[in-house]
Image (cartoon, rainbow, N blue to C red):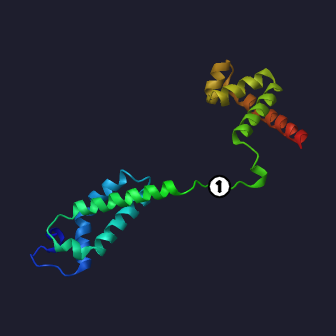
Amino acid sequence: MSAFANDPSGQRSGDADAAIRQLYSHHAKALHSYVEHFCPDGASSDDIVQETFIRAWRHLPQLSADDRPVRPWLFRVARNLLIDADRAARARPVTVQEQPDEEAGTDPGLKQVLDRELVSAALQQLSPAHQAVLVQAFYHGGTLATVARELGIPHGTARSRLHYALHALRRQLQDRDAIAC
């Protein structure tokens, strides 16, 4: 364990804090890199590395008693901690967040489909010119200049139709909403 027990002057260091700092400076980067491959997020990998060095600090007398390298011991401890964390995660039951009562029976996909149907029905009530400008602008993702070019109308006319088409669509949707209530 002379890799961290001796300071640069060759003197044996009796200070455990200095030994751990030296151990950390020599091995933390490699250990962190190893642990990151197996952790789902950065916080988990930081926790594993921290716990590894805490265990090294606790076992410092045993580690410094022999001349074996420390890095394999650190990696073995990190590996064991990773295995323990994985087992603990698999042993925990999956928790589902409770939904408020008013939303408990609704399916977000169903709501989206119903909204599409509502908008589609409202679009059918508009004039063909208004329908065309809305479809070109919003469903095909065209700019106002592209819409005008595609429909063969002047830019100002496309802008005006889009304004009035949105106004008419809004009115249709509000009327349908008023009927539904």
Q: Residue at x 26, y 72 (%)?
A: 21
The answer to which of 18 and 134 lies nearer the viewer is 18
Q: Quadrant of residue 4?
A: bottom left
Category of crowding for the residue at label 1, using alpha-carbon neighbours closer than 10 angstroms: few (below 14), some (14–19), many (at least 20)? few
Task: Give the vertical position of 39 relative to 126 (above or below).
Answer: below
Whether residue 164 is visible, yes or no, is no
The answer to which of 17 and 165 lies nearer the viewer is 17
Residue 88 horizontal/vertical position (percent): 47, 59
Q: Residue at x 14, y 68 (%)?
A: 67
Looking at the rendered structure, the kind of residue marked 1 is: Gln
Secondary structure category for the residue under label 1: loop
Q: Residue at x 75, y 36 (%)?
A: 115
Task: Give the vertical position of 37 relative to 157 (above or below).
Answer: below
Quarter containing the C terminus: top right
The answer to which of 160 and 75 lies nearer the viewer is 75
Task: Give the vertical position of 82 relative to 107 (above or below).
Answer: below
Q: Quadrant of residue 60?
A: bottom left
Residue 27 horizontal/vertical position (percent): 25, 62
Residue 13 horizontal/vertical position (percent): 17, 79
Quarter containing the N terminus: bottom left
Q: Report the side of 24 relative to 181 (left or right).
A: left
Q: Residue at x 61, y 55 (%)?
A: 95
Task: Give the vertical position of 56 relative to 33 (above or below).
Answer: below
Q: Which residue is mark 1?
A: 97
Q: Quadrant of residue 124?
A: top right
Residue 123 horizontal/vertical position (percent): 78, 28
Q: Residue extending furthest top?
A: 152
